[in-house]
Image: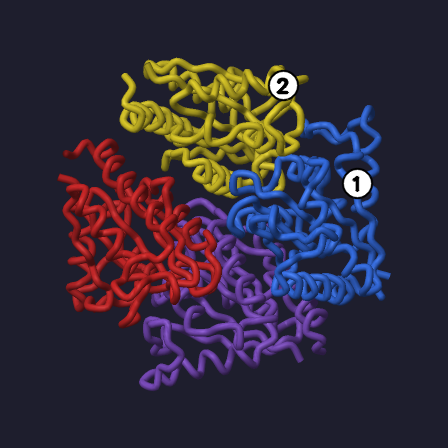
Chain colours: A blue, B yellow, C red, D purple
Amino acid sequence: MVKIVGIAGSLRAESYTHQALHLAVQRVEALGAEVEILDLRKMNLPFCDGGDEYPEYPDVKRLQESVKQADGLILATPEYHGGISGVLKNALDLMSFEELSGKVVGAISILGGQSNSNSLNQLRVVMRWVHAWVIPEQIAIGEAWKAFDKEGKLLDNKLSERLDKFAVSLVENTRKLRGVG
Amino acid sequence: MVKIVGIAGSLRAESYTHQALHLAVQRVEALGAEVEILDLRKMNLPFCDGGDEYPEYPDVKRLQESVKQADGLILATPEYHGGISGVLKNALDLMSFEELSGKVVGAISILGGQSNSNSLNQLRVVMRWVHAWVIPEQIAIGEAWKAFDKEGKLLDNKLSERLDKFAVSLVENTRKLRGVG
Amino acid sequence: MVKIVGIAGSLRAESYTHQALHLAVQRVEALGAEVEILDLRKMNLPFCDGGDEYPEYPDVKRLQESVKQADGLILATPEYHGGISGVLKNALDLMSFEELSGKVVGAISILGGQSNSNSLNQLRVVMRWVHAWVIPEQIAIGEAWKAFDKEGKLLDNKLSERLDKFAVSLVENTRKLRGVG
Amino acid sequence: MVKIVGIAGSLRAESYTHQALHLAVQRVEALGAEVEILDLRKMNLPFCDGGDEYPEYPDVKRLQESVKQADGLILATPEYHGGISGVLKNALDLMSFEELSGKVVGAISILGGQSNSNSLNQLRVVMRWVHAWVIPEQIAIGEAWKAFDKEGKLLDNKLSERLDKFAVSLVENTRKLRGVG
C-alpha cells in the first residue's frame, strides 16, 4: 500500500495551505493510499542548526521517522516573497537523503496574489537535490482568500480537476517508481 | 554614509557562513560603509506564522527596524539541500516591502560540497519579489571546510578577489542607487 | 542621454511580444531616453555555434555594436514551455560580457496562458551571469490574446500602470547606475 | 524495449557536449536501451516562429516524429551565459506536449568554467512544463576542456560513476514509468 506523508508549511490557525493539503489528501486516500499528515502547528521543531541531533526536540525524530517510512510526500507551501516558507524549508533542513531520497513528491503552493510558480520551482530544485522525484503535475492556488467555498472546496472547477489529476499522478507514479501496491 | 546590515542564515556555533559574512563586512567597512551585523544566533526569533505582530518576540521589531534603516544588505546563507536555509528564509518572511523594498543586496552562499548557484538564484528571486536590487556580483564558497585559513581568511586568491569586487560593487552601487554619500 | 536597445524574442508577424515591447519603448522615450529597436524578424542571425566570428552574417556585428553602445536593454520574450524563447536566448548567446556587462535591463514576458515568472526568472539568471543589472520591476502579460485593445494598448489598467513604473525605474536607475543624463 | 533519443544543444564541430552525450548513450545502450541521436549539426532546423507548420524544413517533422516515438530523452546542453543554449531551446520550442509530455528525461550540461546547475535547473522547469519527468540524477561537467582524455572518456572517476548512475536511473525509471521492457 502506498504511504504518503503530507506536510503544510504554514503555521496560521486558519490556513489555506492546510486546506489545500486537506483536499489533496482526501483525493489521494480515495485512490487507496494511506496518508499521515504531520501538522507543523502541533509539532515542536527547532530551527535547524546544521547538526544531526536535537535531543530536546523529540518531534525531530518523529518527523524523520514518518517521512523515512513513506513512499511519497505532499508538500504544500504558502508562497512568501516569491519563495517556499522558511517554516517548510526548515522542516526539510532537519532531514536529509536518508529520509527524502527516492521519495515521490507532489508540490502545492498557495498565494495571496496572482498564481505563480516561484516556490514550486524552488521546491523542485530542493527535492531534486536530495534525489526525490517531483511529479510534473503541480498546483498553484492564487488569490487563496477567494479560492475556497464555505465547505473548504475549490471554487474553480478547472483547478479542482487539476488537483484530481495531481492526486492520480502522485498515487499511480509512486506505485510505479516504488514498486508498491 | 552608506548603511549596510549583514545577516548570516546559520545557527552553527563555528559557522563558515558567519566567517564569510565577516570577511565581506570587513571589506565593506574599509570602503567607508557603516555595518551592523544581526546575529541570528543571539536573537530570539519565532517561526513566521503569516501575521504581522509578534509581541512576545521584541527581536522581530529589532530585525525590522535595523533593516528598514539600512541602505543595503549582505545576506549570507549556508546552502542546505540546494536552497537557502530555512533560518534565513524565515527571517526574511518576518519582514516585507516596508523593510526590504529598494534595498541593495549582496548575496553569499556557503556549501559543504562543490560550489553552485542554487541558493543564490533563489535569494535573487525572493529579493526581487520585494523589489530589492541584488548586485550582479555574488559569492559562492564551495567545500567551505577547506576554504579558510586559521585566521579565517580565504585561501583561494581568486575567490578573495571576487569578494573584493563584491564589496566594491555593493558600496558603490548602493551609493548610486540610494543617493547616499 | 540614456540609450536603450529593445529586443523582442519572437519571430511571429503579428506578435504580442513586439506589441508589448512597443508599449514599453513609447514610455521610455517619453521619459527622455533614446531607443533603438532591433527587430529579429528583419535581421539575419545564425544559430550560435560557440564561436566568435560569423563573417557571413553582418547582422551579428550590428547586434553586438548596438547593444555595446547602449546603457540599457528592454528584453521581451514570449514564454515558450516555461522558458525564454530559443530565438532570444540565441541572440544573447551571440553576445558576451563585452556587450552585456554592466547594462541595466528591463524584462518582459508574454504568455498564452496564465501569467507566470518562469522566463523572467531565467532572464534574470542569464543577465546576472554576464553581470548586467535586471531591474526589480518586471512585466508578465498573461493570456496575451485578450490583453490588448485594437490600438495595441493594454486593457488591464493595473498592468498598464505596472508598465509605467517599469519604464520609470528603467530610465531613472539606468541614469543612476550608468551616470548618464 | 526502451527507446531513447539523444539531443546535444551545440553546433560546434569539436563539441564537448556531443562527447558527453556520446558517453551517456554508450552506457544507456549497454543497459539494453535503443538510442537514436539527433545531431542538430546535421539537421536543417528553422528558428521557431510560434507556428506549427514548417513545410520548407522537413527536419522539423523528423525531429518531432523521433521524439514522439521515444520513451525517454537525453538532453545535453552547453551552458551559455548561465542558461540552456538557444540552439537547444529552439529545438524544444519546435515541439510541444504531443512529442514531449510523459517522456523521461536525463539532463546533462557542459561548462567552460566551474560546474553549476543553472542550465540544468532551467531544463527541469521547461521539461516539467510539458509534463515530462526529469530524473533526479543529473550531470554537470565543468571546465570541459580538461574533462576528457584523448579517447573521449571522462578523466574524473567520480564524475564517470555519476554518469553510470545517471544511465541506470534513466533506463530503469523509464521502464517503470513507461511500462516498457
- The crowding category of the residue bearing disc 2, from other C-alpha atoms within 10 Å (few below 14, some 14 to 19, many at least 20), is some
Q: Are marks 2 and 1 on the same chain?
A: no
Q: Quadrant of residue D80?
A: bottom left
Kindly identify which chain the residue marked by label 1 belongs to: A
The image shows residue D143, relative to residue C135, as above or below, that is below
Image coordinates for residue C3, horizontal then vertical, percent: 17, 44
Camera sees residue A80? yes
- The Cα–Cα distance between marks 2 and 1, rounded to whole angstroms, is 24 Å
Element type where label 1 sits in the image: helix
Q: Which residue is mark 1?
A: A64
Question: Along the horizontal axis of the image, is A178 left or right of D143?
Answer: right
Camera sees residue A123? no
The image shows residue A81, relative to residue D157, as above or below, that is above
Q: Amino acid at mark 1?
A: Gln
The image shows residue A38, relative to residue B143, as above or below, that is below
Q: Quadrant of residue D47?
A: bottom left
Residue drawn at 46 percent across, 40 percent down: B129
Image coordinates for residue C159, horizontal then vertical, percent: 37, 50
Observer-nearest of A61 and D156: A61
Q: Which numbered disc covers residue B41?
A: 2
Question: Along the horizontal axis of the image, is A27 left or right of B51?
Answer: right
